[in-house]
Amino acid sequence: MTDPNEVKVEALLSIINSSAREAMAEYKNTGHGVPGVDTDTLHPLDFATDTLALRKAIRLLEGACEQLNAILAPPQHTAYNFVNNYSWACIDVATQSCIADVLDKHPEGLSVDALADAVNLDRTKIARVLRFLALRGCFKEVKRDVFANTRLSLVLKSTNDVVFCIRDQRDSPKYAAVLYETMIDQEFARSNEVEKAPRAFALRKEGKNNNFWEMDDEARETFHKCMIGHSVIYGSYAALHYYPWDNVSSVVDVGSGTGTMSIPLAKMFPHLRITNQDLPETMKLARNTWEKNAPEALLDGRVELVPLNFLEESPVAGKDVYYLRSIIHDWPDDEASVILHNIRKVMGPNSRVLIHDCVLLRKFEEPGVGANGSTTKAPKPTLLNFGSNTPHQHDMTMWLLFNGKERTLNEFKNIGQVPSIPGYVNDF
Protein backbone atom coordinates (compact mmCIF):
# COMPACT_ATOMS: atom_id res chain seq x y z
CA MET A 1 0.00 0.00 0.00
CA THR A 2 1.35 3.42 -0.98
CA ASP A 3 2.27 5.73 1.87
CA PRO A 4 -0.14 8.73 1.68
CA ASN A 5 2.62 11.06 2.88
CA GLU A 6 4.85 9.89 0.05
CA VAL A 7 2.02 10.60 -2.37
CA LYS A 8 1.86 14.18 -1.09
CA VAL A 9 5.59 14.61 -1.56
CA GLU A 10 5.37 13.32 -5.12
CA ALA A 11 2.48 15.70 -5.79
CA LEU A 12 4.54 18.61 -4.49
CA LEU A 13 7.45 17.62 -6.71
CA SER A 14 5.07 17.60 -9.67
CA ILE A 15 3.77 21.06 -8.76
CA ILE A 16 7.32 22.38 -8.44
CA ASN A 17 8.23 20.98 -11.84
CA SER A 18 5.12 22.25 -13.63
CA SER A 19 5.14 25.73 -12.06
CA ALA A 20 8.86 26.16 -12.79
CA ARG A 21 8.22 25.26 -16.42
CA GLU A 22 5.35 27.74 -16.56
CA ALA A 23 7.65 30.46 -15.25
CA MET A 24 10.34 29.50 -17.79
CA ALA A 25 7.77 29.72 -20.58
CA GLU A 26 6.82 33.25 -19.55
CA TYR A 27 10.44 34.36 -19.78
CA LYS A 28 10.98 32.61 -23.09
CA ASN A 29 7.84 34.18 -24.55
CA THR A 30 9.59 37.56 -24.39
CA GLY A 31 12.24 36.29 -26.80
CA HIS A 32 15.01 36.87 -24.26
CA GLY A 33 15.17 33.44 -22.69
CA VAL A 34 15.39 32.40 -19.05
CA PRO A 35 17.53 34.65 -16.80
CA GLY A 36 20.61 33.27 -15.07
CA VAL A 37 21.46 33.64 -11.40
CA ASP A 38 24.83 35.25 -12.25
CA THR A 39 23.67 37.50 -15.07
CA ASP A 40 24.46 41.17 -14.60
CA THR A 41 21.54 42.63 -16.55
CA LEU A 42 17.83 42.90 -15.85
CA HIS A 43 15.38 40.84 -17.88
CA PRO A 44 12.69 42.71 -19.87
CA LEU A 45 10.04 40.90 -17.83
CA ASP A 46 11.46 42.15 -14.53
CA PHE A 47 9.64 45.48 -14.69
CA ALA A 48 6.80 44.70 -17.06
CA THR A 49 3.42 45.82 -15.75
CA ASP A 50 1.59 42.63 -16.76
CA THR A 51 3.39 39.70 -15.13
CA LEU A 52 0.29 38.01 -13.73
CA ALA A 53 1.00 34.59 -15.27
CA LEU A 54 4.60 34.64 -14.03
CA ARG A 55 3.56 35.71 -10.54
CA LYS A 56 0.97 32.94 -10.33
CA ALA A 57 3.60 30.39 -11.27
CA ILE A 58 6.10 31.76 -8.74
CA ARG A 59 3.46 31.87 -6.02
CA LEU A 60 2.84 28.17 -6.52
CA LEU A 61 6.53 27.35 -6.87
CA GLU A 62 7.49 29.13 -3.65
CA GLY A 63 4.61 27.63 -1.70
CA ALA A 64 5.32 24.07 -2.85
CA CYS A 65 9.05 24.40 -2.16
CA GLU A 66 8.43 25.70 1.35
CA GLN A 67 5.95 22.94 2.10
CA LEU A 68 8.32 20.29 0.76
CA ASN A 69 11.09 21.58 3.02
CA ALA A 70 8.73 21.58 6.01
CA ILE A 71 7.84 17.93 5.34
CA LEU A 72 11.29 16.52 4.67
CA ALA A 73 13.53 18.58 6.96
CA PRO A 74 13.75 17.79 10.70
CA PRO A 75 11.25 20.02 12.52
CA GLN A 76 13.90 21.59 14.73
CA HIS A 77 15.80 22.60 11.60
CA THR A 78 12.76 24.31 10.10
CA ALA A 79 11.73 25.97 13.37
CA TYR A 80 15.19 27.43 13.86
CA ASN A 81 15.24 28.69 10.28
CA PHE A 82 12.16 30.76 11.10
CA VAL A 83 14.27 32.99 13.33
CA ASN A 84 17.83 32.37 12.12
CA ASN A 85 17.63 34.61 9.06
CA TYR A 86 19.70 37.74 8.70
CA SER A 87 19.27 38.39 4.98
CA TRP A 88 17.34 41.54 5.90
CA ALA A 89 20.31 42.90 7.90
CA CYS A 90 22.79 42.29 5.09
CA ILE A 91 20.42 43.80 2.52
CA ASP A 92 20.14 46.84 4.78
CA VAL A 93 23.93 47.23 4.79
CA ALA A 94 23.99 46.97 1.01
CA THR A 95 21.24 49.52 0.45
CA GLN A 96 22.37 52.03 3.07
CA SER A 97 25.93 52.04 1.72
CA CYS A 98 24.85 51.97 -1.97
CA ILE A 99 27.11 49.04 -2.79
CA ALA A 100 25.16 48.18 -5.95
CA ASP A 101 25.66 51.75 -7.25
CA VAL A 102 29.42 51.48 -6.78
CA LEU A 103 29.65 48.05 -8.41
CA ASP A 104 27.50 49.24 -11.31
CA LYS A 105 30.48 51.33 -12.45
CA HIS A 106 32.66 48.20 -12.46
CA PRO A 107 30.77 45.44 -14.32
CA GLU A 108 33.90 43.27 -14.41
CA GLY A 109 34.09 43.40 -10.62
CA LEU A 110 35.74 45.52 -7.93
CA SER A 111 38.16 44.46 -5.21
CA VAL A 112 36.83 44.46 -1.69
CA ASP A 113 39.58 46.93 -0.72
CA ALA A 114 38.47 49.46 -3.33
CA LEU A 115 34.82 48.85 -2.49
CA ALA A 116 35.45 49.35 1.23
CA ASP A 117 37.18 52.65 0.50
CA ALA A 118 34.33 53.78 -1.76
CA VAL A 119 31.63 53.18 0.88
CA ASN A 120 33.83 53.89 3.92
CA LEU A 121 33.28 50.55 5.63
CA ASP A 122 35.59 47.83 6.93
CA ARG A 123 36.80 45.52 4.13
CA THR A 124 36.45 42.29 6.15
CA LYS A 125 32.92 43.07 7.24
CA ILE A 126 31.90 44.13 3.73
CA ALA A 127 33.20 40.84 2.37
CA ARG A 128 31.25 38.85 4.95
CA VAL A 129 28.03 40.67 4.07
CA LEU A 130 28.52 40.19 0.33
CA ARG A 131 29.42 36.51 0.64
CA PHE A 132 26.30 35.96 2.72
CA LEU A 133 24.12 37.63 0.07
CA ALA A 134 25.94 35.90 -2.80
CA LEU A 135 24.65 32.58 -1.44
CA ARG A 136 21.19 33.83 -2.45
CA GLY A 137 22.26 35.14 -5.86
CA CYS A 138 22.51 38.77 -4.69
CA PHE A 139 25.99 39.96 -5.79
CA LYS A 140 28.67 37.49 -6.88
CA GLU A 141 32.34 36.92 -6.13
CA VAL A 142 33.95 36.75 -9.59
CA LYS A 143 37.36 35.89 -8.12
CA ARG A 144 38.89 35.97 -4.68
CA ASP A 145 37.88 39.20 -2.91
CA VAL A 146 36.45 40.72 -6.10
CA PHE A 147 32.69 41.33 -6.25
CA ALA A 148 30.22 42.32 -8.97
CA ASN A 149 26.51 42.92 -9.38
CA THR A 150 23.95 40.35 -10.40
CA ARG A 151 20.43 40.76 -11.73
CA LEU A 152 19.16 40.53 -8.17
CA SER A 153 21.53 43.12 -6.71
CA LEU A 154 20.78 45.60 -9.50
CA VAL A 155 17.37 46.30 -7.98
CA LEU A 156 19.21 47.61 -4.90
CA LYS A 157 20.60 50.62 -6.77
CA SER A 158 19.57 53.95 -5.27
CA THR A 159 18.03 55.03 -8.57
CA ASN A 160 15.50 52.20 -8.37
CA ASP A 161 12.23 52.93 -6.58
CA VAL A 162 12.21 49.34 -5.31
CA VAL A 163 15.08 50.15 -2.96
CA PHE A 164 12.96 52.74 -1.16
CA CYS A 165 10.45 50.03 -0.28
CA ILE A 166 13.25 47.73 0.89
CA ARG A 167 14.81 50.45 3.02
CA ASP A 168 11.40 51.20 4.50
CA GLN A 169 11.44 47.76 6.13
CA ARG A 170 14.59 48.40 8.17
CA ASP A 171 12.69 49.32 11.35
CA SER A 172 10.22 46.45 11.11
CA PRO A 173 12.34 44.03 13.20
CA LYS A 174 12.30 46.59 16.00
CA TYR A 175 8.50 46.69 15.95
CA ALA A 176 8.26 42.91 15.66
CA ALA A 177 10.53 42.50 18.68
CA VAL A 178 7.91 44.08 20.97
CA LEU A 179 4.93 42.17 19.57
CA TYR A 180 4.62 39.87 22.57
CA GLU A 181 5.08 42.80 24.95
CA THR A 182 2.14 44.59 23.34
CA MET A 183 0.01 41.45 23.69
CA ILE A 184 0.49 41.36 27.47
CA ASP A 185 0.67 45.10 28.17
CA GLN A 186 -2.42 46.29 30.04
CA GLU A 187 -2.89 49.34 27.81
CA PHE A 188 -2.09 47.75 24.44
CA ALA A 189 -3.19 44.12 24.73
CA ARG A 190 -6.93 44.52 24.06
CA SER A 191 -6.76 47.60 21.86
CA ASN A 192 -7.13 47.75 18.08
CA GLU A 193 -6.48 51.49 17.92
CA VAL A 194 -3.85 52.79 15.53
CA GLU A 195 -2.11 54.47 18.47
CA LYS A 196 -1.78 51.08 20.20
CA ALA A 197 0.10 49.27 17.44
CA PRO A 198 3.49 47.64 18.13
CA ARG A 199 5.22 50.46 16.23
CA ALA A 200 3.73 53.02 18.61
CA PHE A 201 4.77 50.88 21.59
CA ALA A 202 8.37 50.61 20.39
CA LEU A 203 8.71 54.30 19.60
CA ARG A 204 7.13 55.34 22.88
CA LYS A 205 9.76 53.30 24.70
CA GLU A 206 12.36 55.36 22.84
CA GLY A 207 10.58 58.62 23.63
CA LYS A 208 9.85 59.31 19.95
CA ASN A 209 6.77 60.63 18.15
CA ASN A 210 4.70 57.65 17.03
CA ASN A 211 2.37 59.33 14.51
CA PHE A 212 3.19 57.56 11.26
CA TRP A 213 1.60 60.23 9.07
CA GLU A 214 3.47 63.22 10.50
CA MET A 215 6.38 63.67 8.07
CA ASP A 216 8.61 66.44 6.84
CA ASP A 217 8.84 67.05 3.09
CA GLU A 218 11.86 64.79 2.61
CA ALA A 219 10.30 61.90 4.50
CA ARG A 220 7.03 62.34 2.61
CA GLU A 221 8.80 62.18 -0.76
CA THR A 222 10.71 59.08 0.32
CA PHE A 223 7.49 57.42 1.49
CA HIS A 224 5.78 57.94 -1.85
CA LYS A 225 8.79 56.58 -3.72
CA CYS A 226 8.46 53.59 -1.42
CA MET A 227 4.86 53.19 -2.57
CA ILE A 228 6.02 53.09 -6.19
CA GLY A 229 8.53 50.40 -5.27
CA HIS A 230 5.82 48.53 -3.38
CA SER A 231 3.65 48.48 -6.52
CA VAL A 232 6.51 47.06 -8.59
CA ILE A 233 7.43 44.42 -6.00
CA TYR A 234 3.88 43.15 -5.53
CA GLY A 235 2.73 43.42 -9.13
CA SER A 236 0.06 46.03 -8.42
CA TYR A 237 0.25 47.33 -11.97
CA ALA A 238 -1.53 44.20 -13.14
CA ALA A 239 -4.70 46.10 -12.23
CA LEU A 240 -4.04 48.25 -15.30
CA HIS A 241 -4.61 45.17 -17.46
CA TYR A 242 -7.29 43.18 -15.63
CA TYR A 243 -9.97 45.72 -14.79
CA PRO A 244 -12.33 46.95 -17.56
CA TRP A 245 -11.13 50.57 -17.56
CA ASP A 246 -12.42 50.97 -21.13
CA ASN A 247 -15.95 50.71 -19.74
CA VAL A 248 -15.67 53.61 -17.29
CA SER A 249 -15.11 57.32 -17.82
CA SER A 250 -14.14 58.66 -14.39
CA VAL A 251 -11.97 57.40 -11.53
CA VAL A 252 -11.24 58.73 -8.06
CA ASP A 253 -7.95 57.44 -6.67
CA VAL A 254 -8.72 57.67 -2.95
CA GLY A 255 -5.51 58.01 -0.95
CA SER A 256 -3.71 58.35 -4.25
CA GLY A 257 -0.35 59.46 -2.99
CA THR A 258 1.57 61.19 -5.76
CA GLY A 259 -0.13 59.16 -8.49
CA THR A 260 1.60 55.79 -8.24
CA MET A 261 -1.27 54.03 -10.02
CA SER A 262 -3.17 56.89 -11.61
CA ILE A 263 -0.25 58.24 -13.67
CA PRO A 264 0.20 54.98 -15.61
CA LEU A 265 -3.59 54.67 -15.70
CA ALA A 266 -3.86 58.09 -17.36
CA LYS A 267 -1.22 57.13 -19.91
CA MET A 268 -2.81 53.80 -20.82
CA PHE A 269 -6.41 55.08 -20.86
CA PRO A 270 -6.40 58.71 -22.03
CA HIS A 271 -10.20 58.80 -22.11
CA LEU A 272 -10.38 58.61 -18.30
CA ARG A 273 -11.08 61.62 -16.12
CA ILE A 274 -9.02 60.99 -12.99
CA THR A 275 -9.25 62.63 -9.59
CA ASN A 276 -6.36 62.19 -7.17
CA GLN A 277 -7.30 62.71 -3.53
CA ASP A 278 -4.99 62.66 -0.53
CA LEU A 279 -3.83 64.95 2.26
CA PRO A 280 -3.00 68.56 1.26
CA GLU A 281 0.76 68.13 1.72
CA THR A 282 0.71 65.07 -0.51
CA MET A 283 -1.28 66.88 -3.19
CA LYS A 284 1.43 69.55 -3.41
CA LEU A 285 4.01 66.86 -4.00
CA ALA A 286 1.68 65.10 -6.44
CA ARG A 287 1.46 68.17 -8.68
CA ASN A 288 5.22 68.16 -9.10
CA THR A 289 5.14 64.45 -9.89
CA TRP A 290 2.40 64.82 -12.50
CA GLU A 291 4.16 67.80 -14.08
CA LYS A 292 7.29 65.71 -14.41
CA ASN A 293 5.80 62.37 -15.50
CA ALA A 294 2.45 63.14 -17.17
CA PRO A 295 2.24 66.88 -17.93
CA GLU A 296 -0.11 66.27 -20.85
CA ALA A 297 -2.79 64.94 -18.48
CA LEU A 298 -2.66 68.17 -16.46
CA LEU A 299 -2.65 70.36 -19.56
CA ASP A 300 -5.62 68.49 -21.05
CA GLY A 301 -7.59 68.77 -17.82
CA ARG A 302 -7.87 64.98 -17.57
CA VAL A 303 -6.68 64.92 -13.97
CA GLU A 304 -7.58 67.01 -10.95
CA LEU A 305 -5.80 67.06 -7.61
CA VAL A 306 -8.18 67.56 -4.70
CA PRO A 307 -7.12 67.48 -1.02
CA LEU A 308 -8.96 64.97 1.16
CA ASN A 309 -8.85 63.53 4.66
CA PHE A 310 -10.82 60.35 3.99
CA LEU A 311 -11.49 59.77 7.69
CA GLU A 312 -13.30 63.10 7.97
CA GLU A 313 -14.58 63.90 4.47
CA SER A 314 -16.10 62.30 1.42
CA PRO A 315 -14.32 62.26 -1.96
CA VAL A 316 -15.70 64.08 -4.99
CA ALA A 317 -19.20 62.91 -5.86
CA GLY A 318 -20.74 60.88 -8.63
CA LYS A 319 -17.71 59.21 -10.24
CA ASP A 320 -17.71 55.79 -11.88
CA VAL A 321 -14.96 54.10 -9.85
CA TYR A 322 -13.60 54.85 -6.39
CA TYR A 323 -10.25 53.09 -6.29
CA LEU A 324 -8.41 52.28 -3.06
CA ARG A 325 -5.00 50.65 -3.46
CA SER A 326 -3.29 49.56 -0.24
CA ILE A 327 -5.54 51.87 1.79
CA ILE A 328 -8.09 49.74 3.63
CA HIS A 329 -5.45 47.34 4.96
CA ASP A 330 -3.73 50.25 6.76
CA TRP A 331 -6.65 50.68 9.12
CA PRO A 332 -8.49 48.80 11.87
CA ASP A 333 -12.11 47.88 11.17
CA ASP A 334 -13.67 51.03 12.64
CA GLU A 335 -11.59 53.42 10.54
CA ALA A 336 -11.89 51.21 7.45
CA SER A 337 -15.68 51.33 7.78
CA VAL A 338 -15.59 55.13 8.10
CA ILE A 339 -13.56 55.42 4.89
CA LEU A 340 -16.00 53.23 2.98
CA HIS A 341 -19.02 54.97 4.49
CA ASN A 342 -17.69 58.35 3.41
CA ILE A 343 -17.32 57.04 -0.13
CA ARG A 344 -20.76 55.50 -0.13
CA LYS A 345 -22.35 58.87 0.65
CA VAL A 346 -21.20 60.32 -2.70
CA MET A 347 -21.59 57.30 -4.99
CA GLY A 348 -23.96 57.44 -7.92
CA PRO A 349 -26.33 54.61 -8.90
CA ASN A 350 -23.68 53.09 -11.19
CA SER A 351 -20.60 53.83 -9.12
CA ARG A 352 -18.29 51.07 -7.96
CA VAL A 353 -15.69 50.77 -5.20
CA LEU A 354 -12.54 48.96 -6.30
CA ILE A 355 -10.46 47.76 -3.33
CA HIS A 356 -6.95 46.64 -4.27
CA ASP A 357 -5.67 44.65 -1.29
CA CYS A 358 -4.76 41.06 -0.47
CA VAL A 359 -7.57 38.59 0.22
CA LEU A 360 -6.72 36.04 2.89
CA LEU A 361 -7.93 32.45 2.73
CA ARG A 362 -8.50 30.37 5.85
CA LYS A 363 -8.89 26.65 6.35
CA PHE A 364 -12.19 27.03 8.18
CA GLU A 365 -13.97 29.94 6.57
CA GLU A 366 -17.36 31.48 7.09
CA PRO A 367 -20.22 30.22 4.87
CA GLY A 368 -20.51 31.80 1.45
CA VAL A 369 -16.84 32.56 0.82
CA GLY A 370 -15.90 31.74 -2.73
CA ALA A 371 -19.52 31.00 -3.63
CA ASN A 372 -19.30 33.28 -6.66
CA GLY A 373 -16.23 31.43 -7.94
CA SER A 374 -14.12 34.57 -7.91
CA THR A 375 -11.33 33.34 -5.64
CA THR A 376 -8.80 30.81 -6.93
CA LYS A 377 -7.86 27.88 -4.70
CA ALA A 378 -4.43 26.29 -4.59
CA PRO A 379 -4.11 22.72 -5.90
CA LYS A 380 -3.74 20.00 -3.31
CA PRO A 381 -1.58 19.34 -1.35
CA THR A 382 -0.34 22.94 -1.22
CA LEU A 383 -1.57 24.98 1.71
CA LEU A 384 -4.03 27.87 1.69
CA ASN A 385 -2.86 31.04 -0.06
CA PHE A 386 -0.91 28.62 -2.28
CA GLY A 387 1.41 27.84 0.59
CA SER A 388 2.80 31.33 0.16
CA ASN A 389 3.16 33.41 3.30
CA THR A 390 3.23 36.71 1.39
CA PRO A 391 -0.39 37.74 2.20
CA HIS A 392 0.18 36.88 5.84
CA GLN A 393 3.49 38.75 5.85
CA HIS A 394 1.48 41.74 4.62
CA ASP A 395 -0.98 41.12 7.41
CA MET A 396 1.79 41.11 10.02
CA THR A 397 3.27 44.32 8.59
CA MET A 398 -0.07 46.10 8.86
CA TRP A 399 -0.49 44.85 12.43
CA LEU A 400 2.98 46.00 13.47
CA LEU A 401 2.60 49.45 11.91
CA PHE A 402 -1.03 50.44 12.40
CA ASN A 403 -3.05 47.65 13.99
CA GLY A 404 -4.33 47.27 10.45
CA LYS A 405 -4.76 43.95 8.68
CA GLU A 406 -5.31 42.06 5.48
CA ARG A 407 -8.81 40.60 5.34
CA THR A 408 -10.80 37.63 4.17
CA LEU A 409 -13.61 38.18 1.68
CA ASN A 410 -16.20 38.05 4.45
CA GLU A 411 -14.23 40.58 6.51
CA PHE A 412 -14.30 42.95 3.56
CA LYS A 413 -18.05 42.41 3.28
CA ASN A 414 -18.49 43.10 6.97
CA ILE A 415 -16.70 46.45 6.99
CA GLY A 416 -18.52 47.54 3.87
CA GLN A 417 -21.81 45.76 4.51
CA VAL A 418 -21.68 44.54 0.93
CA PRO A 419 -23.94 41.70 -0.29
CA SER A 420 -22.49 38.84 -2.30
CA ILE A 421 -22.20 40.13 -5.86
CA PRO A 422 -20.83 37.99 -8.71
CA GLY A 423 -17.43 39.29 -9.75
CA TYR A 424 -17.00 41.24 -6.49
CA VAL A 425 -13.41 39.99 -6.12
CA ASN A 426 -10.95 39.55 -8.98
CA ASP A 427 -7.93 37.27 -8.61
CA PHE A 428 -5.08 39.63 -9.46
Image (cartoon, rainbow, N blue to C red):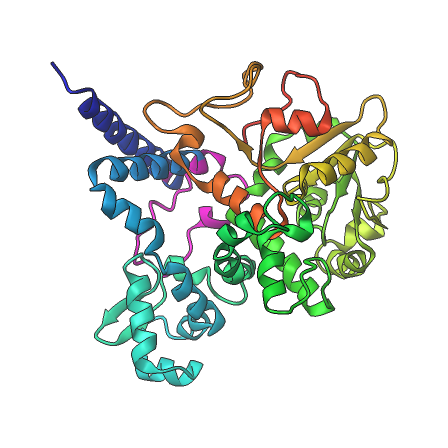
Q: Residue 295 in the image: x percent, y percent?
A: 77, 55
| Quarter occupied by residue 293 | bottom right
Q: Residue at x 72, y 60 (%)?
A: 292
Left or right placement of residue 22 versus residue 298 in this view: left
Whether residue 247 sits left or right of residue 234 in the image: it is: right
Query: Residue at image x 49%, y 28%?
Result: 361
Residue 412 highlighted magenta (yes or no) = no
Which residues are the magenta region?
A: 28-55
> Image point 21% across, 41% down: which residue?
73
Q: Main secondary structure of the magenta part?
A: loop
Which residue lies most toward the left here? 1
- Front residue (pair 212, 165): 212
The answer to whether residue 139 is visible is yes
Left or right of 296? Residue 332 is left
Which quarter of the rendered picture does the C terminus lie within? top right
Query: Which quadrant of the view contains residue 383?
Result: top left
Q: Where residue 40 appears, x then y in whole percent?
A: 36, 61
The quadrant of the picture occupied by the N terminus is top left
- The location of residue 56, given as percent across then percent down, is 44, 34
Residue 224 or 362: which is nearer the viewer?
362
Residue 111 in sight in this render: no
Q: Is residue 322 above or below residue 233?
A: above
> Is residue 41 shown in magenta?
yes
In this view, 197 is above or below 10: below
